[in-house]
């Protein structure tokens, strides 16, 4: 491990190279922490980068415990009130409607809440409702509240929606319906609907005493399940089982995984997912997703989550609820195959759209210092491939490729554009949409992800004003892809023992990315092409060589002709071949010096 200095500014991919930006800590801090914990110093440097500077926090981070690291659900202001009302509803045979979002966070919340209430005897009192993305849009609407009243529901429980539904909360109260909101989307400076019967949210007045402000909605739903099961003889076992669903939703919703409670939920959920499930639907989903053993956060994010999400993106998310309610393996597998087919359809639609956007970007010839290119805004008719169900994913891909905030609008036949946005550090999407709020029909979301509705005739004005706003908050250095290394290491640091030590940082995700390392001036012995797409390097001196693989980078091979040394941004992994294990470098970018 060497000092945190860097002179390289960009690699061959065009990405900026940086070191993790944290207040310099004296070597004595690292020495003290190593003496107290006995941990690898490179692992400890990664932990220091994540804000952990005492032994107790380090041990809690490296060994999250489901039973000990969960906060009491009753720290949420209205939890007592919500749990008592639902218990009374079960006792008095009152009807309960559960209304959630159509994404993974929403659908897993629906399953957690409905299964918990059924365990307590609610049975046919429960009805789960998910709005249709294409005909109803996001959120709790007045129409849903009116429908609940007409069908004589006494309670509505929302999850992953409702936190901004002030008018709907007022209507529910007027119609004699008790509205219980489980959400986490509360924008800064706003508060929860005052006329709801109970609001369970880790932010705002409801969560003022709750330590973890980063719960996903499925995490809030798990807290409500915990409160409902208080005193139940099988509480621990039931919660441990429900944590599998909460782990899936938490990873898929990309909430902060540095929060100890979220880490405990996800770590335990992943561990439980590696054991045989009693739920036929979950068994079928895992089988069809062809996940690794052991299952990782990567598997959830890229194999399981997309299949659950596909239903709400392509058709209707009711299929997800049907999957988890399936009674037999045959019934579950039929539904899982349906989800898999929808996911394949989603992938095709997404691929076509992204290729179209790439072509538009190439033709635009983006300029980093152009005031009209800091934010990318694309719009097109839904019939021309701007499918409402995939524009959010497409936004993420374009941000990853360009390092610029991206807004994509899908225009329907009535001239209304339904949009998604994704951002970069330093550009708060909700604040940006606030700045153009008079052009919007409606909007909402997080600093890094948002949704909005706008008249198609207002899109160009929105684009101009978003870029004017960006010129005030984003510098030229904020634009473009950035690779941020945790630590600069030497070739001799790259060992199997270090890889095994770093594994303890998992699960990876937002707030806890997989460590990235800078390795400088490495002797380059050879470069070869693999399968006409990838590059494989042999690096180091003759008796101390190590292999490095750069996926989908064959186009760069001519640049290495006659080059004696290279610098890398890379991750470390174990390569297993013929029962042998070696440390291998997974290259993210290369710089030539």
Image (cartoon, rainbow, N blue to C red):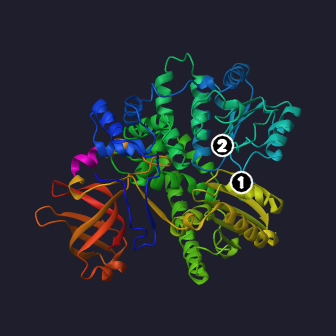
Q: Quadrant of the C terminus?
A: bottom left
Q: Residues within 10 Å of mark 1 (few under 14, many from 20)?
A: some
Numbered disc total: 2
Q: Is residue 518 visible?
A: yes
Q: Is residue 448 left or right of residue 47?
A: right
Q: Position of residue 463 (x, y in %)?
A: 73, 70
Q: Quadrant of residue 529?
A: bottom left
Q: Is residue 507 visible?
A: no
Q: Position of residue 368 (x, y in %)?
A: 58, 73
Q: Residue at x 26, y 70 (%)?
A: 536
User: In the drawing, what numbered circle is on residue 160?
Assistant: 2
Q: The magenta stretch spans which residues?
A: 495-501
Q: Position of residue 215 (x, y in %)?
A: 58, 38
- Residue that label 1 marks: 431
Q: Secondary structure at mark 1?
A: helix
Please determine whether, in this image, residue 92 is positioned above or below residue 540: above
Q: Residue at x 33, y 68 (%)?
A: 550
Q: Choose the circle earlier in sequence order: 1 or 2.
A: 2
Q: Is residue 404 left or right of residue 468?
A: left
């Amino acid at each position: 491990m060497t000092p945190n200095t860097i002179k390289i500014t960009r690699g061959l991919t065009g990405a900026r190279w940086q070191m993790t930006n944290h207040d310099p800590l004296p070597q004595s801090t690292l020495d003290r922490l190593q003496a107290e914990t006995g941990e690898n110093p490179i692992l400890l440097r990664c932990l220091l980068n994540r804000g952990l500077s005492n032994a107790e926090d380090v041990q809690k981070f490296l060994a999250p415990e489901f039973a000990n690291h969960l906060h009491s659900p009753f720290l949420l202001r209205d939890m007592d009130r919500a749990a008592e009302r639902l218990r009374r509803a079960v006792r008095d045979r009152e009807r309960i409607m559960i209304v959630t979002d159509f994404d993974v966070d929403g659908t897993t919340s629906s399953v957690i809440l409905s299964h918990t209430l059924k365990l307590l005897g609610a049975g046919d009192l429960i009805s789960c409702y998910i709005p249709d993305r294409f005909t109803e849009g996001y959120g709790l609407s007045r129409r849903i509240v009116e429908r609940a009243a007409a069908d004589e529901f006494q309670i509505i429980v929302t999850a992953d929606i409702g936190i901004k539904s002030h008018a709907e909360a007022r209507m529910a109260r007027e119609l004699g319906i008790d509205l219980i909101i489980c959400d986490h989307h509360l924008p800064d400076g706003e508060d929860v609907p005052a006329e709801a019967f109970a609001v369970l949210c880790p932010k705002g007045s409801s969560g003022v005493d709750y330590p973890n402000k980063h719960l996903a909605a499925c995490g809030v739903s798990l807290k409500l399940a915990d409160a409902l099961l208080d005193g139940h003889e099988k509480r621990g076992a039931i919660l441990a089982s429900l944590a599998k669903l909460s782990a899936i939703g938490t990873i898929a919703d990309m909430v902060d995984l540095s929060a100890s409670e979220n880490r405990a939920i996800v770590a335990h959920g992943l561990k439980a997912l590696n054991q045989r499930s009693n739920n036929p639907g979950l068994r079928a989903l895992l089988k069809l997703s062809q996940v690794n053993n052991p299952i990782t956060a990567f598997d959830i994010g890229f194999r399981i989550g997309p299949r659950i999400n596909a239903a709400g993106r392509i058709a209707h998310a009711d299929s997800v609820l049907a999957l988890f309610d399936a009674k037999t393996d045959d019934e579950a597998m039929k539904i899982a195959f349906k989800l898999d087919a929808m996911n394949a359809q989603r992938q095709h639609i997404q691929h076509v759209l992204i290729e179209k956007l790439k072509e538009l970007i190439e033709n635009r010839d983006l300029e980093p210092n152009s005031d009209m290119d800091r934010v990318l805004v694309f719009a097109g008719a839904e019939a021309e491939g701007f499918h409402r169900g995939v524009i959010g994913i497409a936004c993420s891909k374009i941000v990853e490729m360009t390092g610029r905030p991206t807004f994509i609008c899908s225009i329907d036949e009535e001239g209304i554009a339904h949009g998604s946005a994704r951002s970069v550090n330093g550009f708060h999407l909700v604040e940006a949409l606030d700045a153009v709020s008079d052009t919007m029909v409606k909007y909402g979301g997080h600093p890094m992800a948002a949704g909005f509705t706008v008249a198609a005739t207002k899109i160009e004005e929105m684009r101009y004003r978003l870029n004017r706003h960006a010129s005030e908050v984003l510098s030229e250095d904020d634009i473009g892809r950035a690779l941020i290394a945790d630590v600069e290491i030497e070739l001799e640091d790259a060992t199997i023992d270090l890889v095994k030590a770093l594994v303890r940082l998992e699960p990876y995700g937002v707030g806890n990315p997989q460590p990235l390392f800078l390795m400088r001036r490495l002797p380059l012995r050879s470069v070869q092409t693999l399968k006409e797409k990838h590059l494989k390097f042999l690096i180091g001196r003759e008796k101390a060589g190590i292999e490095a693989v750069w996926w989908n980078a064959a186009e760069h091979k001519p640049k290495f002709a006659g080059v004696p040394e290279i610098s890398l941004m890379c991750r470390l992994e174990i390569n297993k071949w013929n029962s042998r294990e070696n440390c291998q470098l997974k290259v993210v970018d290369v710089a030539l010096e």
